Amino acid sequence: MSRGQTPDPDGFDSVLALVNDASARRVREKPAAPYDQEADGRTGDVRRAAEDPRATRPAEPRPGTVGGPPEPDGGLPEQDGAPAADAAPSRTEWPAEYGPEPPGPAHASPGGTRGTRPRRSSEAPGSAATSSDDAAEVRTPADAAGSATARATPTDAGAAAHGQRGARPTGRAATGWPEAVRVAGRAGQAVRERTSGVRPALELPLAEALGLVLARPLAALTDLPPFDTSAMDGWAVAGPGPWRVREEGVLAGQSGAALADGEAVPIATGARVPRDVTAVIRSEHGRLDAHGGLQPQREVVHGQDIRPRAQECRTGDTLLPAGSAVTPAVLGLAAAAGYDTLAVHARPTVDLFVLGDELLTSGLPQDGLIRDALGPMLPHWLRETGAEVRTVERLGDRPDALARALAASEADLVVTTGGTAAGPVDFVHPTLARLGAELLVDGVAVRPGHPMLLARTAPGQHLVGLPGNPLAAVCGLLTLAVPLLRGLAGAPLRERPAAGRTPGGSARPDVYETRRVQLSTGPLAATAPPGPEATTLAPTAVLDAPVPGHPSDTRLVPVRVDAGRARPLSFSGPAMLRGVAAADALVVVEPGGAHAGDQAELLALPWTGGGGGFT
Ligand SMILES: Nc1nc2c(c(=O)[nH]1)N[C@H]1C(S)=C(S)[C@@H](COP(=O)(O)OP(=O)(O)OC[C@H]3O[C@@H](n4cnc5c(N)ncnc54)[C@H](O)[C@@H]3O)O[C@H]1N2
Ligand code: MOO
């Protein structure tokens, strides 16, 4: 059998057909309900009873939980002081393991607002989401698309330190979420390209290359299999039977002499098939007669149970493109293909500075102090993403300490937590200004996490400022730090679906249709089949429930993913980690919201094995 005779050796085409078929039968459910107020910790909407006669008052919900009132610092433009408990949706069955139920189809408003366009300040006061904050925060896609850089001036930063609500230190519009992801990824790529001369690829023994990124394509150093191989234990036969059986068998690692027609030789799985063998007969499919002759028990097909040389690859074939993550499977493949060492990019280095005087490192929260949730979380998350975390320091609220730490850092990436907003001790902007850093992204149109920032602090060095609210920090990590690290590490940047918003801004399911192929290899499969270029497709899943959108900003919502379906989780407010701790991914909800049944992009978490990191 020659290479390529098997039409669909791994069943990929047939699985794809099944997936397409299932997808075609997908039942479209009700659209998302309006995004009226952000109830911190809810994934769904809060509507006023007057707008939705089905709304009922829940039994004493806690603030920040499903059905509870929004926290006062939800940070969203729609807050208008309306008591959110009035707007709580009615209840349906919900698995207890998910915590309180996020609104599903039953809670959708009659009309739905999929495609809600950003509201403008000129719209009637008193409409569902108009407030002075709203007007201040509404941004058009054109505004938000800007990736212009700005030098952080002391004056700009001073404005931030004086804390006008919603004011951006530079007076610039927030960068749109997709653009922010791109800017961060390209910033990392640019550093790697510029420094490739001074930081050449490492040539490491296989075991030391695990978790790094291939600097060169993995080209086969041998045919695989390197010779015709028996796929089964049994007899190698030549010509038609019955056959005279030679006494001396062939084991794996041995070579037997050529067979003449009518001869057979016992053979083991993996043994090199002697010359002129026409088939292998499995031991259970043949019988030795009284004279030592071999009788077939069923029809023998030419070439059966022989793995022909180069069935998997020929010498020189590209097995994986540069930029692929070195996983345990890649180590196995590289070894099989003849490699002792691999050319890989070094891990990007990270220094992490945790800001905030209110943070305790042990014990129970007390006297207004809280536990630091980011120090214990981020170093491991960054490592799982592929970075080498060199320093983790808690700097309190001491601007000088931050300035000194930044000046001393030699890491590729500095990550700070907290201090990005406009409070009295939010000094990240002023410190960057003091150091003459260049702001590449200064606020992102995403919820949670909008004060996040990306700056170039020195040639070849960047800083990602994560907001202090823990889920906002996670969103900043996934929006800015992970793409930057991917770029630095030489991993391919994620590709999003090319185009496609409804006029109101909501994701169109048809835009994602080309991504259905990904479901064929699992709900979180992220890496495209190997080709000449490494590409990483954004994984997607079908939403189980509508997710109300922010009028102008992207939302990132923790979800559980099962069999390609994403179920939004409760407790997904900016200050909460309860949702994300139970999640497989964050779902990207375009401005305007998403329907149940929509195919939506996922940001996988590194430990789900779905492409959150470089893998
Ligand atoms: N006037 C305005 N205030 C705020 C705005 C705004 O636009 N105007 N945005 C809000 C949003 S949205 C966010 S998010 C936060 C971001 O604040 P900072 O990055 O300055 O962070 P902090 O003020 O330092 O902390 C916010 C919050 O998070 C807690 N925190 C901080 N670090 C940790 C940690 N390591 N572990 C656990 N919790 C942490 C901190 O105690 C605060 O409760 O700003 C809003 N305000
Ligand atoms: O509330 Mo803030 O959106 O960034 O977490």
Image (cartoon, rainbow, N blue to C red):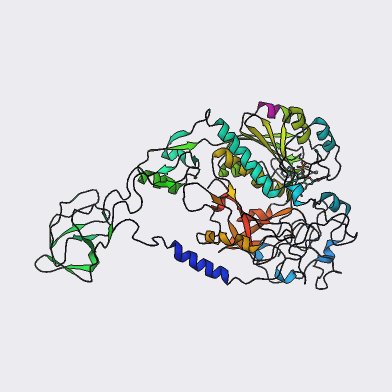
Q: Residue reaching furthest right?
A: 125
**Would you place residue 523 above or below residue 532 in this image?**
below
Q: Nearer the viewer, residue 581 or 477?
A: 477
| Near-viewer residue (32 or 282) | 32
Please report the residue visible at 81 percent of the width from the left and 34 percent of the height from the top: 157
Magenta stretch: dominant secondary structure: helix
Left of 276 or right of it: where is 381? right
Q: Position of residue 420 (x, y in %)?
A: 76, 40
454 inside magenta stretch? no
Q: Residue 281 placed where, x, y %? A: 23, 64
Q: Residue at left 53%, top 52%?
A: 609
- Which quadrant does the N terminus fall into? bottom left
Seen in the picture, residue 7 relative to 480 is either above or below; the reply is: below
Residue at 33%, 54% in the rendered image: 311
Please identify the quarter of the rendering in which residue 188 is found.
top right
Horizontal and vertical percent for residue 254?
21, 49
Q: Is residue 492 left or right of residue 52?
A: left
Which range of residues does the magenta coloring cover? 404-408
In the rendered image, the vertical position of residue 298 relative to residue 43, given as above or below:
below
Residue 41 picture quarter: bottom right
Q: Can residue 566 be seen at all in this image of the molecule?
A: no
The relative height of residue 355 versus residue 66 in the rendered view (above or below) is above
Q: Nearer the viewer, residue 379 or 477?
A: 477
